[in-house]
Amino acid sequence: MTALLSIRDLSVRYRRDGIEVAALKGVSLDVEAGERLAIIGESGSGKSTLALATAGLLAGGAGIGGTIDWQASQFQTPRSVAPPSVLPDISPARGEIGSSAAGSLAATQEIGEGGDDDLISPLAGEMPGRAAGGATERRSSAIGDNNIPLLGRDIGFVFQDPSSSLDPVMPVGKQIAEVAHTHLGLGWSQSLARAKTLLERVRLPDPESALRAYPHQLSGGQKQRVAIAAAIAAGPKLLIADEATSALDTIVQAEIVSLIRRLVAEDGMTLVFVSHDIALAATLAERIAVLRHGELIELGEVHRIIDAPRHAYTRTLLDAHLGLDAEPLLDRQGASA
Amino acid sequence: MTVLAVSKLSKRYRRGGKPLAAVDDVSFEIGPAETLALAGPSGSGKSTIARLVLRLLEPDAGRIEFEGADFLSLSGATLRARRARLQMVFQDPLAAFNPRATVARVLDDPLRIHGIASRAERPRRIAALLERVGLDAGLAARAIHEISGGQRQRVAIARAIATQPSLIVLDEAVSALDVSVRGQILELLLDLQRQERISYLFISHDLGVIRAVAHRVVILDAGRVAESGEARAVIDNPQSTIGKALVAATPKLNRNTPP
Ligand SMILES: Nc1ncnc2c1ncn2[C@@H]1O[C@H](COP(=O)(O)OP(=O)(O)OP(=O)(O)O)[C@@H](O)[C@H]1O
Ligand SMILES: Nc1ncnc2c1ncn2[C@@H]1O[C@H](COP(=O)(O)OP(=O)(O)OP(=O)(O)O)[C@@H](O)[C@H]1O
Ligand SMILES: [Mg+2]
Ligand SMILES: [Mg+2]
């Protein structure tokens, strides 16, 4: 397998009210091309931070160290202009580069939020840029120029709350078409036709009229289908879903999970699926990465993680899961009505 | 003997000019020290039933009998007195509080309002309540926003048991908690049930949790009872279409090694 991206020694610090929070501490991880990788862990363990860093979406003010090395041939090249973000509410961000790893890995990219990759020096302490550009590239002979993955074109991102990625005052068809228009250079009518096809692919009932629907006219599950359609509209290589089904009821969650599985298979996408639910992660992913307090404590094939966890914390998570085959707590306590 | 008997309960809303039967002819009973779970997909009417039982909402039809009295006909001082016996814990119940309020303040309110303890006695009562839910008494001085989600849910439970209720309505009370914390809170609830014989109306979308803690379950679909029975029997072998769909949609771990 070839790695689509290699994350090395990634550290992220947030600053809030003068206090520093180390959200990620030296995380190293390869995402293989075409795999389905789940990132699990409890609240605050750094899952979203890892997903956002990978997509180049970290908010300004976050202190970032380490590298993300993208496999050049996996992405469409070259790029000349930074297209607008498909996520209208993500504000332009300013990143900082930690100096710790900057000098050690020569043939890799520095991460940060810069869209103007040409201007970025790998050793810069701080740099301006846009969140939309995704990871920026350190000029290096091993990778070559201008093959920076772009959010929207190369990376699709689905959030827990579809309302945060959909514009409430724009028909959903137009929102999906805009991604195709921006990133694929399609004309407007072609883009709208593609939007309709995508609404069919995500199985929205009556796609023709759904094109003209506004987000508030759709249920939570339907909105999430639209958000997925927008995320994959430009045919990205990598789909990142951050708790994309956590706000949905079990039945709708199962539908969205099988939708994601089907789309990823049909388009040959790589999937990074963030979830706090180890059982859900196990149903969808091939490999599971376990985060705790900002550290990657375990990574492996789903069956290995579930049947033979190496880390005590992974075992704790597994034991705390209340499946339909678990021994009822009522019995353990010996209580009865 | 029953603590709560709900019969033929109905509640309609109007949405977009059309009537919507949020709760439609629902009946169930809860005995002492019993946990009855309400399950069902989103919008099936679980929270509406909770609010009707708590009289935060008036039904269009039906009867609610609580501790043998016609709960819907109570008003004024009798209603207030009876309400002390019927408490609630929501997903993030303390979100409604001023986040700067201290834990002591949150626990002081029910003791004062229901005249359970004198002013001088209350600090000792508060310390005992905190201890009862496994929290350090030192936490009393902390603000709500300064404690963790799990600690907040313990405070919410302490607040609920302050008035010595016979029934607590829990609406997705453990849904937002990390699994490790969730286990501890469920153990606490079972422990309280055994020792104080409290009954629970336990609302959850998670069949695994329901199967672990509930004696019986009512599965709702579009406001109606789809099926009901002993929790494990129903979940292990659902008969209704919605029951089967809920079980099929529950993620399974399929561990191959003994835990
Ligand atoms: N913008 C921010 N500013 C300050 N601190 C932040 C910010 N975002 C996250 N954090 C902190 O960083 C840590 C990791 O947060 P992150 O959101 O990555 O966790 P998570 O695993 O996604 O949690 P959850 O399951 O609750 O979504 C936490 O301590 C969190 O409070
Ligand atoms: N105030 C209201 N006005 C109009 N309709 C309402 C109102 N509150 C609830 N409903 C509708 O009543 C039905 C039942 O809602 P309810 O909140 O009881 O469901 P639930 O089972 O608790 O769902 P969830 O699992 O999403 O919490 C839904 O169709 C909902 O949209
Ligand atoms: Mg998160
Ligand atoms: Mg509800």
Image (cartoon, coloured by chain):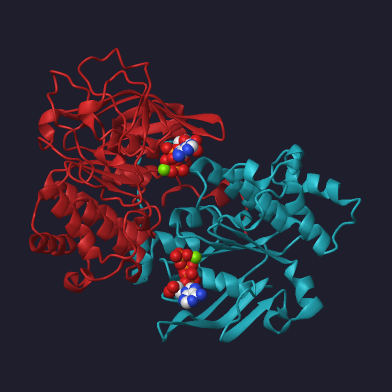
Chain colours: A red, B cyan
- Spot the residue most to the top: A104
Front position in the image: B186 or B60: B60
**Residue at the image position 74 percent from the left and 45 percent from the top:** B130
Q: Quadrant of residue A289?
A: top left
Please say if B209 is above or below A141: below
Front position in the image: B223 or B176: B176
- Which quadrant: the C terminus of chain A? bottom right
Q: Does residue A295 appear in this view?
A: yes
Please say if B122 is above or below A14: below
Q: Quadrant of residue A292?
A: top left
Left or right for A85, reference A245: left
Q: Does residue B228 appear in this view?
A: no
Front position in the image: A61 or B151: A61
Left or right for A125, reference B54: left
Q: Position of residue A255 (x, y in %)?
A: 28, 59
Q: Position of residue B184 (x, y in %)?
A: 58, 43
**Residue at the image position 37 percent from the left and 17 percent from the top:** A99
**Residue at the image position 40 percent from the left and 56 percent from the top:** A247
- Which quadrant: the N terminus of chain A? top left
Q: Position of residue B231 (x, y in %)?
A: 49, 62
